[in-house]
Amino acid sequence: MSKPSSFSLRGRRALVAIKDERDLSIVRRQFERLGIDIFIWEPGDALECHPDVALIDDEFLPLASPAHRVLPGRCPVIALLGTETPSRLKLVLELDPASFLVKPLRSAGIYAALVMAFERTERTNELKQQVIKLEERLRSRRVVLAAVLQVMHSHAVAEPAAFALIRRAAMEQRKTIEQMSAEIAASGSLPRATG
């Protein structure tokens, strides 16, 4: 299944927490045009939907409940800024917004803010996955190093020769070098066929 395009918004769900009725009516109108389902929310209300994006008015900040503070982790947040004071911006940054809009809202800019939010979130998630993979590789490199040292010691060979023995054993058994190294580290020796 392919991921939805950041530019295609039809069928997405938005959680909207906006105090000003004028701003809310602009968002409603734009979201209807874009095919986005809207759920109006006020801090204190239960979160009854799983939104694809959240628009949070800075007038609702700080979000007092821990349940409400986890909202930004679930979906991209677009912050609605009314003032640019350092204290207000600090509260907004706690939401880790993917995009922002400046109040009073206009219809221009809402689509761009949505696309930017979805795209930034997608890129951030890809980077997080890359970091996880790199951390796993780093952990596995420690196992490979331990196996190389064991083979060097047990076979009285230099590092390149020990690594070559491990690689050959992995190829013979159709395993990754990391898997073979873990087995060597656990058993303390190379498989007998490779010796």
Image (tube, rainbow, N blue to C red):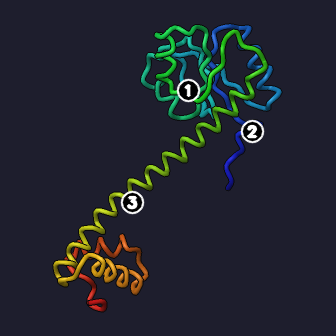
Query: Are the residues flagged by discs 1 and 2 in contact, CB closer than 8 Å?
Result: no
- Counting residues from the start of the chain, the first of labels 3 and 1 encountered is 1
Query: SS class of the residue under badge 2?
Result: loop
- Counting residues from the start of the chain, the first of labels 1 and 2 encountered is 2
Q: Quadrant of residue 50?
A: top right
Say which residue label 1 marks.
Answer: 97
Identify which amino acid the numbered label 3 is placed on: Arg
Task: Give the vertical position of 16 relative to 149 (above or below).
Answer: above
Label 2 crowding class (10 Å Cα cut-off): few <14, some 14-19, many 20+? few
Nearer to us of marks 3 and 1 is 3
Say which residue label 3 marks.
Answer: 137
Identify which amino acid the numbered label 1 is placed on: Pro
Identify which amino acid the numbered label 2 is placed on: Phe
How much space separates mark 2 and mark 3, taking CA atoms? 34 Å
Query: SS class of the residue under badge 3?
Result: helix
Residue at coordinates 79% horizontally, 23% vertically from top-left?
30
User: Picture coordinates of residue 15 (x, y %)?
Assistant: 63, 25
